[in-house]
Amino acid sequence: MTASHQEHVLSGYKVLDFTQHIAGPAATRLLVEMGAEVIKVELAPGGEPSRHAPYIKGRSGYFIQQNRGKKSLCVDVKKPEGLAILKGLLPKMDVLVENFAPGAIARLGLGYETVKSINPKLVMCSISAFGQQGPLAAKPGYDFIGAAYAGILDMNGDPNGSPCFPGMAIGDMSTGVHAVAAIACALLYRERTGKGQHLDISLVDSYFHYHETSVHV
């Protein structure tokens, strides 16, 4: 096969994307760049919140950065007809990615046990601030919250002053990368066993990986 006809490593894989903001959309954007077909599900009537971020020439640069290359589907999942559309897509999907608060997607009617019953080979990846279970699971959180809980902010800035917040979404982006690594491994596992699984990716865990000697003293 010549270089001009090479396929991407995830060509042929299909992803149903329920993510918003940065961490989740970054993960699915990377899957697009690896060749997967990603269908971004936007909840009616407002769609993805980042569509309404600061505009550049009438479009949200924030939205475009993390969602380029994806297909878009806007449905009202709270209506039976909308939920039926999404359930109808599940047998054709390889991966489902969501980053709602823990339990939210189940309340929409698409929890892991439900999607597994429809497609046992599906790899479902849930991205959250603190994981799907545990004492902090119900708490909402964005990048800087995860950085604080992981002890990252405590290590930056003036010792006698306020923490120094990074000017980039380091935690969100790295959480997206952690999600992609887990999804790729889960797809490999599925090739070997025929079984899907539910992945639990948290922002605070991803941030904690940046520590080295600081956790040993």
Image: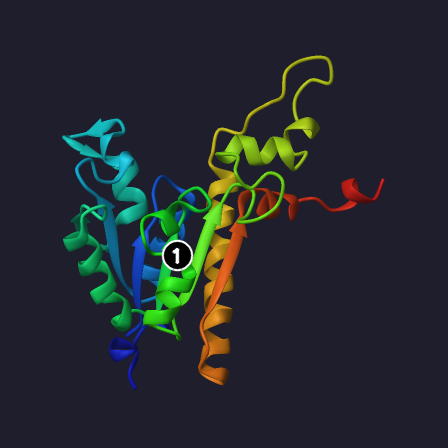
Dot 1 crowding, Cα within 10 Å, few <14, some 14–19, many 20+: some
Q: Amino acid at mark 1?
A: Gly
Q: Quadrant of the N terminus?
A: bottom left
Residue 84, picture quadrant: bottom left
Position of 200 with respect to 6 (left or right) is right
Identify the residue at horizontal 67%, vertical 13% (top origin): 161
Residue 155, picture quadrant: top right
Residue 69 to residue 216: above or below: below
Q: Is label 1 in a helix, a strand or a loop? A: loop
What percent of the width, then of the height, locates residue 204?
59, 42
What percent of the width, then of the height, locates residue 92?
25, 72
Identify the residue at horizontal 63%, vertical 16% (top origin): 162
Residue 80 to residue 3: above or below: above
What percent of the width, then of the height, locates residue 19?
34, 47
Identify the residue at horizontal 49%, vertical 70% (top origin): 186
Residue 72 in sight from this viewpoint:
no
Q: Nearer the viewer, residue 143 or 136?
A: 136
Residue 170 to residue 188: above or below: above
Identify the residue at horizontal 43%, vertical 45% (top origin): 23
Q: Which residue is mark 1?
A: 111
What percent of the width, then of the height, locates residue 115?
35, 64
